[in-house]
Image (spheres, helix red, strand yellow):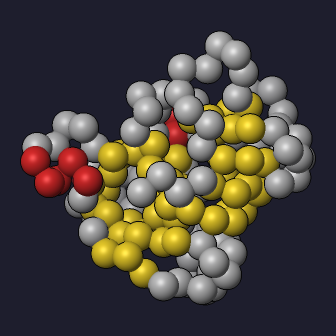
Amino acid sequence: MAQLNLHHGKGLAITVGANADVWEFVANGTVTAGQVVKLDSTQTGEKKVQYVAQGTTDGLAIGVALETVATGATVRVCVGGYIEGVKITGTGGTAGDSLTTGASGAVVVYTAAATDRVVATALEDEDTATIKLYWFRVL
């Protein structure tokens, strides 16, 4: 896993802000740009923090994939900061909403019934199943 000082969104499918933290991981399974990814608990030892898989509601969400890659490829993931084009499901998110992880690698609006932590804040209203948000760094 490598930390990058990426201060632009050039060459990426997803736009990140000037101060975003972008790290490289290895994809375990196909990862899609804009999808929430999680640390891969199926790995052993240190590989648990080197590999990512599609995010779910298990508390292991680490960030948002910035590009689409196949299994075994290196994927750049925003682990903190401003991100555009993040997948969202459920009822429409609006600016100021707290967001958590949902099924299929998307964020959902945080409710009292949520089983995962708040991972981000919506910065504007949902736009056709994607949203602009600020991801809270947990590393």
Find the residue positioned furthest to the front: 139
Q: Relative to 11, does residue 13 appear above or below in the rendering? A: above
Apparent side of residue 45 relative to residue 64 in the rendered image (left or right): left
Task: Residue 90 in the image: state x and y as whole percent.
Answer: 73, 27
Residue 16 falls in which quadrant of the image?
A: bottom right
Percent x, y for residue 88? Answer: 69, 40
Q: Residue at x 60, y 53 (%)?
A: 136
Q: Which quadrant does the N terminus fall into?
A: bottom left
Residue 22 visible from this viewpoint: yes
Give the residue drawn at x 52%, y 40%: 105
Q: Position of residue 43 (x, y in %)?
A: 16, 43
In the rendered image, which quarter is residue 75 located in?
A: bottom left
Query: Residue drawn 88% across and 52% down?
Result: 124
Asked whether, in this view, residue 39 is left or right of residue 45, the answer is right
Position of 91 with respect to 9 (left or right) is: right
User: Is 3 or 65 nearer to us in this picture?
Assistant: 3
Q: Is residue 58 above or below residue 98?
A: above
In the foreground, 138 or 56: 138
Name the residue nearer the viewer: 76 or 13.
76
Q: Residue furthest left?
A: 45
Q: Residue at x 24, y 38 (%)?
A: 41
Q: Is residue 74 visible?
A: no
Q: Residue 65: x, y in percent?
A: 50, 59
The number of numbered badges drawn on the structure is 0
Q: In this rendering, is residue 38 above or below 31?
A: above
